[in-house]
Amino acid sequence: MTRRSRAISRRTVLKGLLGGSVVTIALPTLDLFVNGNGTAFADGAAFPRRFGLWFWGNGVQPSRWVPEATGADWELTEQLTPLQAVRDRISIVSGLRVHAGNDRAHESGPAGFLTGAPLKIEGERETIQLPTLDQVLALELGGETRFRSLELGVAPFTEGRCFNGADSRVPVESSPHAAFERIFGAGFTAPGEDPTPDPTVALRRSVLDAVSEDARGLMSRVGAGDRVRLEQHFDAIRELELRLARLQDDPPSLAACALPAEPAEEYPDVQGRPPLTERNAAMTEVLAMALACDQTRVFSYWFSDPLSNHLYPGAEAGHHKLTHDEPGDQPQVNTIVQYIMDNLRVTIERLSAIPEGDGTLLDNSLVLATTDVSHGQRHSLDEYPVVLAGTACGRLQQGIHHRSSSSENTSKLALTILQAMGVQRDSFGMEEGESTEPLSGLEAT
Amino acid sequence: MFVTGGWTGLRGWSAAVIALSALVSCGPGVGFDAGDAPVELQSEPRPGTLRRLTTAQYHNVLRDVFGEELVLPTRLEPDVASEGLLALGAARSSVSPRGVEQYEEAASQVAVQLTEPGPLRDRLLSCEPGAACARETLARIGRLLWRRPLSAGELGAVDGIAQQASEALSDFHLGLRYGLSALLQSPHFLFRVELGEPDPDDEGQLRYTDWEMASRLSFLLWNSGPDGTLLDAAERGELVTDAGLTTTLDRMLASERLEQGLVSFFDDMLDLAALETLTKDPTIFIQADPQVGPSAREETHRVLIHHLLTQDGDYRDLMTTPVTFLDRKLAAIYAVPAPAREGFGEHAWADDSPRMGLLGHASILASNAHPTSSSATLRGKFIRERLLCAAVPAPPVDVNTALPEPSGNTRTLRERVDEHLENESCATCHAFLDPIGLSLEKFDGLGGYRELDNGAPIDASGELDGVAFDDARGLGRALREHPRLPACLIETLYAYATGHAPGAAEVPLLEALQARFVADGHRVRGLLRQLVLSPGFRRAAAPADGEGAP
C-alpha cells in the first residue's frame, strides 16, 4: 500500500522554501497541500487508512437486531434504532457464524472471530492460539505511527481480548485521563510545533538498547516457550526505541489535529453504576484526536468486556446476569443493547465529524463493531452481530445490509477486512475456523 | 465423579489421597515432629520457567531494597491469571508494548526519586560522587534487584550507561538515574530467571543454583526478593546443601515477613484481589461503599495470619473457627458492635451464631455474588474450585439459561434455581454447585445476615458429597472434614511455589507431602517447610525442547 512519506512533511517543504533557515510557521490548515481531488496529500501520498475494533459484551437479541430487507433499502430494527443518525455511514452484516467452535461461553466468540482459531483448551487452561485481527493489522499498518496500536476501554477495569499470541495479552487502558496522558502528554508534538529537543531521549534509547540486549542474551538459555515470551518482550522494547527515535521527527501535519480537552481524573460510579456515557464521550474524544493526529492507525475500543456484569442505569441486576435471568422478552437487556448502540453512534459520529480532504476521517477508516456472543441468553454464535462503519478509503460500501444466507464463517469477513486494509493475505484462521476466501458483496463498485 | 484434581493430568490421584488420608486421619497432637525428616521421595523434575514479577512482587522488592519512603509506580503491566492463579499466569505471560512503556516510566519515576536529595538518596549512596561510586552502587543494587551478582560484562553495560549519561548531562546523580533505570527495566529484574545447573552430586540431574534458591525461597515465603542476608547465604554456597537450606528456611519461617508471603498465597488461591474492584448496588445494599472490599480482604488476611501463623493452627479449622477481626465497616455489615474504635479488633462468634469460619467472611460471600444479589452458583463454584480444586465444567453453550422471575410460588433463590436442577442440561453442573451455595443463602450479596429472601423464609439446608447439613455452620463442618480440602491446599501451594501445575509425575510427591501434612496436624508452616525441602522445589530439568542451556 502507499504510505505517506514523513521525509516530505509540510515543514520540510517550508524550510526548503525559506532557504534552509530554521523557522517555525504554524499553519492552521493544510488545504494547500491537498491534491486537487481532495483525496490525498499534495505529494501524492494517500491519507492514512485506519482500522478499529469497537467491542461490547454479552451480545444482542437477534430477533430485535437483524434488519429484514437487504441491500441499500433496509430499515433500522429496534436495537439498531440508536444508530439512526449514522445510518448511511454503517453497514450491517448479518447471518455469519463463528465456525471455530463454541466451547467456552463468551470466550469462543471473540477468539473465533478475532483470531479465526478455536480456543485452545487443556484441562483448566484456555488460551487463544493466534494474534487477534487488530494486532495482525497493527503489525502491518502500525510501523509509521507513534503507537503501533491503541487499546482503549470504556467500562472500568476492562481487560479486552487483544492478544499478540498465546498467553500474550495486550492490556487495555480504561481510564480516559491515563489514555490522554499517554498519548498527549510528554512526547506529543502538535502540528506546527517543533519537537522539543531533549537530550535525554538518546539516553533513554541507550538504556532500552541495553535492556533489549539482556532479553536477547537470555533467549539462548531458555526453552522454546520462554523464548517466545522473550521475543515478544524484545519486540516490545524495540517498538519503544523506535517511538523514541521518532520523537524528534516533525509531527504529522494533519489539519484536524488538535489537543483534546483533558478528561476528568476520575469518573466515579453513581449508585454503583459506572457513568458509561460520560466515560465513552471522554474516551471517544481521546481516540478521535489520536487518529486525527495520526498517533496510531489501529485501535481496539472495548466498551465492555465479554461476560461483563456492570450495572446499567435503571437495570435491576448486572448486564450478564440479566441476559440469563431476566424473564420473558427481557426488556432490560433490550434497553442495555440500545444504550450500547447509542454509545457506538457517539464514536461513529465523532469520527465522521473530522474532515480529511474532501471526506472525513471515518471515510478513511474501517470500524468493526461486534460482541462476544450472538444471543446473550443462549451463548449462540450463529447470526453473529456485526456493524461496519467507514469505507476503508472507499473500498467498502456503506449504508447497506448484507446478509449471508448460508451461515458463512466470520473468518471470511476478517479476510475481507484485511484485504480492504491493503494487507495481502489469502487466508485467515486455522482448523475449522479457517477461511481462504473473503466475503463477497461488501466491496464498493 | 467430579471429585478429581483440578490440575491438568492430575485426575485420578485424588482417589489415592482420599484413601490415604482416611487411613492417617489423625487430628492435631499426634506428636509427629515434621521437623527433621524431609520428604525423601524422588519426583520427575520439571524445567524451570521464567516468571514475570507480579505487581505486588515488583512493589515489595522496590520497597524492601530502597525504603518505605519510595512512592511506588502504580501503572504496570497487569497481572494475568492462568488456570485461576496469577502465579501460573506469571509463568506464561510476556511483556506487551504497553508494558514496556509502563516499566520504562516506572523505572524513571523510581530512579528520579532515588537520585533527588533526601533520605532515599542518602541510603542509596555510601560514597562520594564519582565513577567508582556509580560502579559500586550499581553493583550493590544490581545484586539485590537481579537477585545475583552482575557479571563483569553486565555491570560494564549499566555502568557505561551511567557514565555516558553523567557526561552528557554533566551531573553524577542525573547520570546514575539511567544506570538504575537500566537495572529496573531489564528482563533479569522483571523476570525471575531460574533455570538450574548440573548437580555435582547427582550426575545428569539439574538443581536450582544457590542464587536461584534464594529467589525461590524469598518469593515463596515473603513474596519479595531476597535480602542481603539471604544472598550472602547463597554466596557462601549454603542454599544447595541440606543443612544450610534448613537453617535459612527455619530463619525465614520464623520471621514476621512470612505473614506477607502467606497472605499473598491466599490472595491468589482465594482470588481476594478481586475485592479491590468490588461493586455493589448501594440502593440494595445500604452498607455498600468502596471501603467494603478492602476491609473484607483485611479481615480474611488477619484471620489467616492469626490462625495459621500466630496460633500455628490446623488448616481445616479455618472452616470452623469462631475467631475473626472486624473494623467498624464490617461490624456494621455483620450487625455486631465494633470490637475496636479504630482499625480492626478481635471478635468471636457465639456458638449459636449462623456465622463462623472462612465462609462467614464478607470477602468470600460478597466477591462470589452479583452486584444486586447473592449467588448460590458462584459460591458453590468458589468452594468446588478454590477450596476443593475440583474441575467445574464450563457452562453450556447454545441452551436457554433463563431463570424464572420471583413469583408467588418461587420467591426465594432456592425455589428459582430448582429450575437448574430439573432441567437436565443444567442439572449435571448445578447439582454439583447449588446445594453447597444454597446453604449460604442467609448471607446476602454483601455478606450481611438475613432470614428472608423476597419476603419468604430461607431454607439454608444443603449437601456436600453425601454429607447433609442444615445451615452454613454445617457446611463449614462438612468442608473441614472433606478429604479434598488439604489435598487442594497442597496442589495449589505447589503450583504457586513452582510456577507450574503439578502433573502426573508429581503425584507421589504430592501424596507424600499430604501424608506428612496430615500427620503434622495440618499446619501450614510445616507444609511450607516440607515443600521447600522436597525435590519438587530444589530440582530442575532441562527445557523439554532440548534446546537452551545448561
Image (cartoon, coloured by chain):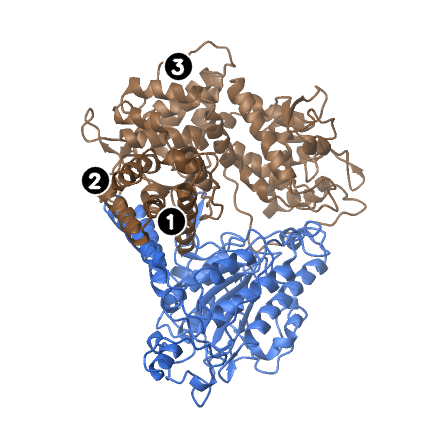
Q: Position of residue B186 (x, y in %)?
A: 33, 46
Which chain shows up in brown? B
Q: Which of the two marks, 3 or 2, is nearer to us in this view?
A: 2
Depth order, front residue of B98/B44: B98
The residue labelled by disc 2 is: B152
Are labels 3 and 2 on one chain? yes
Q: Quadrant of residue A135?
A: bottom left
User: Disc 1 marks which residue?
Assistant: B94
How many numbered discs? 3
Residue A283 seen in this snapshot: yes
Name the spot of residue B279 as percent of width and height, x first: 64, 46
The residue singled out by tag 3 in the image is: B35
The foreground one among A182 and B92 is A182
Mark 1 or 3, closer to the camera: 1
Q: CA distance from mark 1 to mark 3?
A: 39 Å
The amino acid type found where label 3 is placed reads: Gly
Label 3 resides on the chain identified as B
